[in-house]
């Protein structure tokens, strides 16, 4: 299946929605929980950056 720009946008939107539903640090009362949520947010940010790069490469015709 070939992805188009709409697919990239849908995936990015879902990831951002998920990240927005993660608990805020002030709601967490455990250092381990804070660390897990922080790592998850960083992982999602990294994935969003990679997704953006992939979408740009697709726009340039580097992916077919």
Image: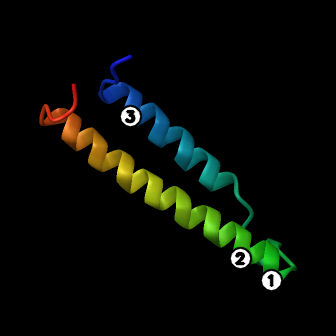
Asked which quadrant contains residue 40, the reply is bottom right
Query: Quick one: label 3, few (<14), some, or many (20+) residues within 10 Å?
Result: some
The residue singled out by tag 2 in the image is 35
Asked which quadrant contains residue 5, the reply is top left
Query: Quick one: label 1, few (<14), some, or many (20+) residues within 10 Å?
Result: few
The structure residue drawn at horizontal position 37% and vertical position 52%, both measured from the top left corner, is 50
CB under 8 Å between callouts 3 and 1?
Answer: no
The residue singled out by tag 3 in the image is 8
Q: Is residue 58 above or below residue 49?
A: above
Separation (CA) of disc 3 from disc 1: 34 Å
CB under 8 Å between callouts 3 and 2?
Answer: no
The structure residue drawn at horizontal position 62% and vertical position 54%, both measured from the top left corner, is 20
Q: Is residue 6 above or below residue 60?
A: above
Q: Callout 3: helix, strand or loop?
A: helix
Residue 27, percent across and down? Answer: 81, 72
Residue 21, percent across and down? Answer: 69, 52
Query: Quick one: label 2, few (<14), some, or many (20+) residues within 10 Å?
Result: few
| Number of marks in the rendered image | 3
CB under 8 Å between callouts 1 and 2?
Answer: yes
The quadrant of the rendering that contains the N terminus is top left
């Amino acid at each position: 299946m070939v992805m188009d720009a709409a697919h990239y946008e849908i995936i990015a939107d879902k990831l951002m929605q998920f990240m927005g539903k993660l608990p805020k640090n002030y709601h967490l009362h455990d250092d381990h929980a804070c660390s897990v949520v922080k790592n998850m947010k960083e992982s999602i940010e990294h994935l969003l950056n990679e997704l953006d790069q992939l979408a740009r490469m697709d726009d340039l015709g580097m992916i077919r």
